[in-house]
Image: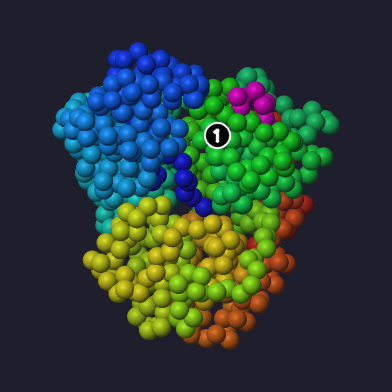
Amino acid sequence: MPGSNRLASPGRSTLKTSQTMPSDDKVAAPQTFAQRAHALFIEGRLDEAEALFRKAVEAAPGQADGHNNLGIFLRRSGRLQEALACYRRALALDPACAEAHVNLANALAELGRFDAAIGHYRQGLELKPASAMAYYNLGIALWNVGENDAAAEAFGAAAERAPDNFEYAVAHAFLLPMLAESAEQTVRWRRRYADNLAGLSAASASRRPPYGALTSFYLAYHNADNRPLLERLAGMFRARVPSLTFTAPHLRGRTAPPAQGRRVRVGFLSEFFREHSIGQLYEGLIARLDRSRFEVVVIHTAQAKRDAGRARIDAMADRTLSLPADVPRMQEAVAAEALDVLFYTDIGDCPPAYFLSFARLAPVQLTSWGHPDTTGVDTLDYFLSCEGIEGPDADDLYSERLVRLGRLPCHYEPVDLPQGGASRARFGLAEAATVYACPQTLFKFHPDFDAVLADILAADAGGVLVIIGGRHPGQEALLRRRWSRSFEAINARTVFLPRMGREDFLALLRCADVLLDPLHFGSGNSMYEAMLAGTPIVTWPGRFARGRVVAAAYRQMGIEDAPIAASAADYVAQALRLGRDAGLREGLRRRLREAAGRALFRDAPAVREFEAFLLAAVAAAAQGGRLPRGWRSASLPCEAPPSALNF
């Protein structure tokens, strides 16, 4: 479910382009050509700007500043390889040009070449040690290669040099490893997180939120109750950034229900309404809401990319809105829509959306399983989930009012599988091997999962583990480094495949004999994709919703003998049983495909139940309250069958 490609700070895989050394925000060279070119760039007159940047180089070809400034322009224009050449030319002319070192490092980091970037950051800082921004970007690069302690030191140095920069302070305070080296390391970093939260809570107010700091994303992968930390975090941000507290004009008096005859206005807000797992999970709800009762507004954050998926989703909406980048203008833009319901589909993965949620912009505000964890934000009224996903103590795990629908809250539109057979040669896999695949983002690989993987491979001499690599080679290296210290045999039997498009991904799911659901934070969108092929997924549901989706889907499909484990040993046994018995495996494949077509895909009852919730929540808000704890729709069978709870 989670994960994005956009440029950002700690918590993502690449660096921000908008903040670098001062030379990236203000042209360093004083030449007239460069000053005019920079002004043209700001105005968006890119062709004219480039021509003048090049004239500046021609006027003084032996000066490093001109090449450095041209590189800045080229990088901002997306021409990274040309920018790299300019920075290298600048350094050939002047090896002591600190700006060129740091700008070269920024470009290398954007390409995922973090080890090389770190060296140039350090050289730039030796020449100009006062640059807070360079220390900040160095911290991001160090974090990406797993040097977490060094990254914390770099963020601390940035915060010391720019004490008024809240983003630097937040990056330093809330750094979390992307891939934990051990469960003990996770405990240590969580303790540091809590201690630093106390310090930031006592600091003075900040004018703006830390837009680039992803402060809580990796907490969801720790197999821990995050509500206490996240409530404290949200309280700190609300106290320190007063501008986050805002109420839309249409809500500043008594909230009345929609006038008779007017449709309920529902806004769906995300950065990822495109060819992305979030787009795929929510596209059906957006398309299928009854337009005689609901008006749908699709809202994109400023970082949202444009692609065919976004165009398709936009075409389903009654209205679309693209937000500006800063929170006050975001608040005004959403407030102007006068929504009845504002649905943040995946709030934990997008800092601007998280900070926007502190405002009261609709009578009903909710989030859901796009990022399956509570937010701690007191202006979010509901967390939309389902009975099968949630454990018995789940109400206490959310700061929001938990709503348990009777079905997975999704209307998933199946896609056609690639034509032809599932050829393993396409992926360099041996036909005779037993392919145990875990095609999940690498930060889902909790240290507790390692022993399970090792036991499966140890018991099946013909087995191979297939994983999809991270966004850059450093992520794979982090996982292999962890295994080398404790389960070296996993390294010898694991194939890392490069990241791939959806057609290749679906073909890989067909090639796999068994899919392995990661412990603690399992499959989401990929579960639906696996059911297209009927490839069985072995799962072990834990305490939290983020590890219980596959089991809930099996129960919804009525698969009584589904591979739902009761322990780590049972997980290993069920994986081996399916891996070794082709007849058992193929029989289950057929039943899964049939059941998914009947009870999982194009789930119209799930849409009707979602509609019932929306209407009831809007009516409750008009009376000044929320739906009661344990609310169920009176018009639909919302209770899950008893077996759904017997995990």
Name the side, left or right, on which 31 lies relative to 611. Answer: left
User: Where residue 210 sits in the image (x, y, percent)?
Assistant: 39, 30
The quadrant holding residue 594 is bottom right
**Magenta segment: does it hold 419?**
no
Q: Is residue 14 visible?
A: yes
| Depth order, front residue of 143/39 | 39
User: Where residue 585 sits in the image (x, y, percent)?
Assistant: 57, 81
- Residue at the spot x=50%, y=28% of the render? 325
User: Where residue 408 sits in the image (x, y, percent)?
Assistant: 63, 57
- Residue at the spot x=41%, y=20% of the render? 52
- Residue at the spot x=48%, y=69% of the render? 427
Up-down relation of residue 143 to residue 558 (above or below): above
| Depth order, front residue of 73/259 | 73
Up-down relation of residue 6 to residue 222 (above or below): above
**Magenta segment: does it hold 339?**
yes
The quadrant holding residue 164 is top left
Badge 1, how many Cα within 10 Å: few under 14, some, many 20+? many
Residue under label 1, please give it: 301
The kind of residue tagged 1 is Thr
- Residue at the spot x=57%, y=67% of the render? 507
Q: Is residue 547 visible?
A: no
The quadrant holding residue 588 is bottom right
Up-down relation of residue 534 to residue 174 (above or below): below
User: Where residue 365 sits in the image (x, y, percent)?
Assistant: 60, 36
